[in-house]
Image (cartoon, rainbow, N blue to C red):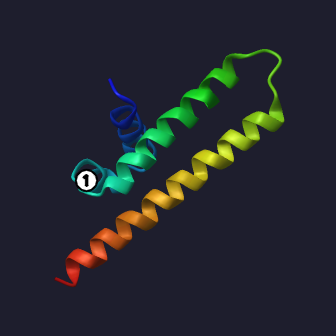
Amino acid sequence: MDLRKIGQARLCLRLPARRDQLQSHDALALDQLFESYATTTQERDSELQISPRDSTRLTDLEAQCAKIEEKVCLLLDVVRMSRAGR
């Protein structure tokens, strides 16, 4: 499975109210965010398996995930509003 699909699947689980939008998108920017999300969540998951954990690194990765989720939601809103205006 490629990073885009991994990130898309993880975001569908994390943002279930946006699942339909995430699965039917047509924005290249979303593909880039999917890849970034996959990479960041995989790094976070790896960090969770390490003992002792680097809490600063883990906090940073969690913040990065949250920022990507926020950007995805904003982009989905822009796409939805632009379609409504057509």
- Left or right: where 60 falls relative to 19: right
Which quadrant of the rendered structure holds the N terminus? top left
Q: Position of residue 57 (x, y in %)?
A: 77, 35
Q: How many marks?
A: 1
Instruction: Say if 36 sits above or below 67 in the image.
Output: above
Quadrant where the C terminus sits is: bottom left
* Between 15 and 74, the one nearer to me in the picture: 74
Residue at 38%, 32% in the rendered image = 6
For residue 54, which quarter of the picture? top right
In this picture, is 18 found above or below 55? below
Query: Quadrant location of residue 8?
Result: top left
Q: Amino acid at mark 1?
A: Asp
Measured as percent of width and height from the top left, residue 33 is found at 45, 49
**Which residue is found at the position 52% from the left and 33% from the top?**
39
Q: Residue at x 37, y 44 (%)?
A: 12
| Residue bearing mark 1 | 20
* x, y percent for residue 30: 37, 53
